[in-house]
Amino acid sequence: MISLEKVSQLCYNITESYLSLNNSNSIIQETQLTLQNSRRDILNTVFTNWNPFGSKIAFSYNGGKDCQVLLILYLSCLWEYFYTFAQQSQYGMEYMQFPISSVSSVLISNDVNFLTMEHFIKDTVDRYHLDMYDFSNAKNSVSSKKNMADLFQDYLDDKSEIEAIVVGVRHSDPYSENLSLIDMTDEGWPNFYRVQPLLDWHLTNIWSFLIYSGEPICGLYGEGYTSIGDIDNTLPNPNLNTNEKHQFYFSEELKSAFNRNRNQSTEIGIDNGDQDFKVNLSNLDKSDRQLLHSYNATYYPGWYLIDEKLERAGRIKKP
Ligand code: ATP
């Protein structure tokens, strides 16, 4: 497994490579702009408020597509921040040591996760060197079922040095229209700064960058899921049922994906005309495959849905 320094450098190379795509495709152009803005926000505002090599900032990660995009971008900025500092130093780059070996992170986990997601989280926690907080160490250990705010409180009771938590929320998420890059938590929540560099990203930007990155993506997205919650309240998006034909918007990204040959991809591709090119998906767990069989329907992969009003249409209570 490569080090945090190396994976941050890889994420930097992915970001730079995406930004240098010379393409008339409007999704790519728009994503390049929004990527530049988020990168500037992270480097010029977030990292000047909270040193990313210090102990006051943490990353909230649940394996979803939005926080994965943000994580790639965050790590890319981490490397850029280090590199810029190292360049200014009187010593050569080869004498500079990357100051941290992992990124302080928090996952509010539930006990009803898809196993595919559990495995994906485990693999990516290792891949991206996330130092995931272990709730069994919480001073006020979980006694009864607690909500998200309570669990953040448990986390902060223990990690009192944390001031800011990076979150992959977008303006199109519920109740998020009025958020800004840095917001204090709402009433009823423990006090911390929510750092939200992805607010202006749209669904098309997320898929464009993630597919181009060549990084492994949670396998559930290949099966028609578009937003992933608990196993008992998340279905494949009904709008992606293969009864109706859908368009594939990301062939440029797929064809020119970063370091494409590196990937050991799993199959995707429903009639996209690009059968040779595959999105890099994590393996689907057997139990989730069986669950999908039980629906007696097939679905286009999640990235065939670009209307963000429908993004959470699969997040419903099962009858
Ligand atoms: P998707 O919507 O496809 O599941 P996602 O999980 O990244 O992707 P949201 O569900 O909209 O996006 O959540 C927004 C952000 O909130 C995440 O990117 C993550 O930073 C944070 N978040 C959400 N749920 C959790 C959780 N259980 N633990 C830690 N962070 C979380």
Image (spheres, rainbow, N blue to C red):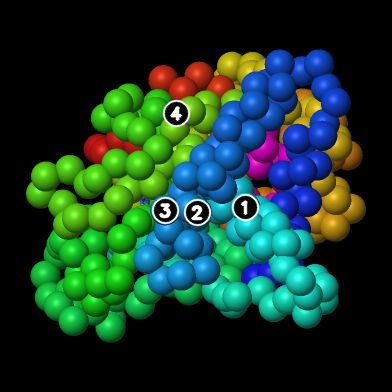
Residue on which disc 2 sits: 47
Q: Which element carries disc 3, helix, strand or loop? A: helix
Q: Which mark is residue 311?
A: 4
Which of pointers 2 and 1 indicates the residue nearer the eye? 2
Nearest the eye: 140 or 96: 96
Residue 205 seen in this snapshot:
no
Asked if disc 2 and disc 1 are in contact, CB closer than 8 Å, the reply is yes
Q: On the image, numbered disc 3 is attached to which residue? A: 49
The three-letter code of the residue at mark 4 reads Glu
Disc 1 marks which residue? 77
64 or 185, nearer to the observer: 185
Q: CA distance from mark 3 to mark 2?
A: 5 Å
Q: CA distance from mark 4 to mark 2?
A: 31 Å
Q: Badge 2: how crowded within 10 Å, few (<14), some, or many (20+)?
A: some
Sequence-wise, the earlier of marks 4 and 3 is 3
Question: Which range of residues does the magenta coloring cover?
Answer: 207-219
Q: Residue 100: percent from the left, percent from the top?
A: 57, 75
Mark 4 C-beta closer than 8 Å to ligand 1: yes
Mark 4 or mark 2, which is nearer to you? Answer: 2
Placement of the C terminus among the 4 image quadrants = top left
User: Compared to 37, does 43 lie above or below?
Assistant: below
